[in-house]
Amino acid sequence: MAITTPATTPIRTAKRVDRFTYAIRNIVAEAKKVEAAGKKVRYLNIGDPNQFGFVTPPHLIEAVAKAMRDGHNGYTASPGIPEAREAVAADFTSRGVETSPDRVLITSGTSEGIELALTGIVDEGEEVLVPAPTYPLYTAVLAKIGATPVYYRTDHTNAWQPDLDHIRKAITPKTRALVVIDPNNPTGAIYSDETRLALIAIAEAHGLVILADEVYGDLAYDGPVPPMALLAPDAAIISYSSLSKAYLAPGWRAGWMAVGRSPRLDPALAAIKKLADGRLCSPGPMQYAVTAALTGDRSHQDTFRRELRLRADLTTERLNKIPGMSCVAPKGAFYAMPKMTLPPGKTDKDYVLGLLKATGILVVYGSGFGTDAGDGFFRVVFLASPQELGEIFDEMAAYRLE
Ligand SMILES: Cc1ncc(COP(=O)(O)O)c(C=O)c1O
């Protein structure tokens, strides 16, 4: 007999969701309210080049279409198709980091690599060093798995370089990994070799694994930055990247991770592969595009880097002219992290929500990336056309938080 009286108690949700925050998308709910009230919103919250007119290289689209036409629509092996794993290994090797295809996994974007690595290595109650400000998926995943993110300072008065002493002091017996995002989201910083070597030395001295997020590696304006593992091929480094940014295909969810050659990482590699079995595989046809991307023409990157530099320069120049605002010049990627002097008692979120309501411009408050709410940082995505950016910065300049 069917039950006709519906229960009224809402289904309870897991406490881990309360700890899981991802400000970049969470803030869209606020923008929708502003839109519903009839105001045009300019979405400068998500780093998606395709939404701003940058297009996926045609040979990648053809590779996916061909894979589908050729019937490659079934599951693949969990770590990915051999051709893609070989292409990733050959790409690392060509950059000076000799890599074997069996230490490569093809993942659903860098995001899945982050989730697999953290889940495979870090236990509940353990700690991971994460930059402040950080790309917030790290803190979100750590919260989900019951581990603790411990922020280390990166310093805007020193071109957003990591504060090495702060890292050393933050290490405890529970620390397991050090996250390095270089080029960085949200700051646009690039780290010097000296800094990278110091980070590796700290990690090695404390038996930490470095999670090297290299998703913007090819988008430094002066040309690709080498993988971190080049400086220390035997250090415990796991690198990851994807087609999302430098190959302009973020919606495909196609990425990769490479586990460093040190035998100390063999158990981590086995753990990550075991977890990867459980999710079957990353999207199959897109894996063919990984091969096409890493073995084919990359001239679109020259154009993209030029366009990014132009926008970075414009953004830095215009934001630094706004009274009370200062902005460190980004050196790669498509983000800037300016700082606004706030009236007493106000937070970065007050500024961002005030700006959204007054102008329809949606940026993300710095505290969503781990800076102090009172410091007044916020992140701008500067992928819009220079003309549109000009209009946006005019409106920003005219807005004042009271
Ligand atoms: C630093 C960083 N890592 C990872 C990601 C996720 O990228 P993917 O699309 O490859 O999952 C992003 C996306 O913005 C990012 O900025």
Image (cartoon, grey):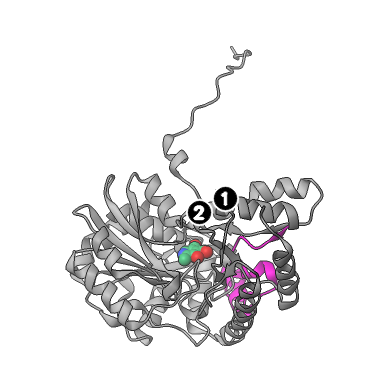
Q: Which residue is mark 2?
A: 374
Q: Position of residue 117 (x, y in %)?
A: 34, 59
Q: Amino acid at mark 1?
A: Lys
Q: Residue at x 59, y 18 (%)?
A: 8
Q: Earlier in the sequence, mark 2 or mark 1?
A: 1
Q: Amino acid at mark 2?
A: Gly
Q: Residue at x 30, y 76 (%)?
A: 100
Q: Secondary structure at mark 2?
A: helix
Relative horizontal placement of residue 293, taking residue 235 as reference (left or right): right
Instruction: Indicate yes or no whether the magenta region holds residue 54.
Output: yes
* Residue that protrudes farthest toward the right in the picture: 38
Residue where numbered disc 1 is placed: 346
Q: Compared to 64, does 230 lie above or below?
A: below
Marker disc for residue 12: none
Q: Secondary structure at mark 1?
A: loop
**Could you tell me residue 2's position as x and y percent?**
60, 14
Residue in the foreground of this view, choosing between 85 and 243: 243
Q: Classify mark 1: residues with Cα within 10 Å, few (<14), some (14-19) or many (20+).
A: some
Q: Residues within 10 Å of mark 2 (few under 14, many from 20)?
A: some
Q: CA distance from mark 2 to mark 1?
A: 7 Å
Magenta region: 41-69
Marker count (numbered): 2
In the rendered structure, are the residues bearing label 2 and label 1 in contact, judged by CB atoms less than 8 Å apart? yes
Q: Is residue 393 left or right of residue 273?
A: right
